[in-house]
Amino acid sequence: MNDYATALQEWLAGTHPSGERAAAARAARGGFVRRTAAQSEALERVRAWTRARFTLGDQIVVMVSELACALPGCPPVETVVAFWTAPERRHHFKIFKPVAEVVPDDLPPAWLRDALVVPEGGDCDCC
């Protein structure tokens, strides 16, 4: 194995001392970042903004998660939002920053709602 392959494996595992990604990986547990009271409040804020932006009723499930990513080229921590407007109609978007840094302007505009639908068979590991 060459130096590049070794460094890449360390980086993907989060053990390479390259800074922010290594710190995020150490803080992460199974891809999910540990939750504090401030973290829970930030998640709830983004959930409320999503409901308001897309005019979603209380019966609509809205999921907001902060994930640590180990893929090359991926931000070290990202916020993922999904909501269901029908049993088989999932909407999905990512914000490439930690949930505590998300502001309302980071959410997609309301008119983009239909474009956020994940098509049947469109699930993938990247999103």
Image (cartoon, helix red, strand yellow):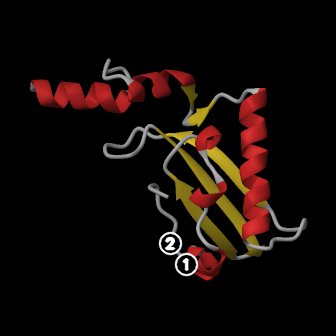
User: Where in the figure is residue 9, as x and y percent of width and height?
Assistant: 27, 29
Element type where label 2 sits in the image: loop
Q: Is residue 56 left or right of residue 58?
A: left
- Find the distance from the CA under tag 2 to the CA under tag 1: 5 Å
Image quarter for residue 14?
top left
- The residue lying toward the viewer, choosing from 17 and 13, is 17
97 shown above or below 104: above
65 shown above or below 49: above
As drawn, the residue found furthest toward the left would be 2
**Which residue was labeled with disc 1?**
119
Residue type beneath disc 1? Pro
- Crowding near the residue tagged with mark 1, few <14, some 14–19, many ≥20 C-alpha atoms within 10 Å: few
Image quarter for residue 35?
top right
- Crowding near the residue tagged with mark 2, few <14, some 14–19, many ≥20 C-alpha atoms within 10 Å: few
- The residue lying toward the viewer, choosing from 122 and 57, is 57
Q: Residue at x 31, y 23 (%)?
A: 18
User: Where in the figure is residue 87, as x and y percent of width and height?
Assistant: 76, 75
**Which residue was labeled with disc 2?**
122
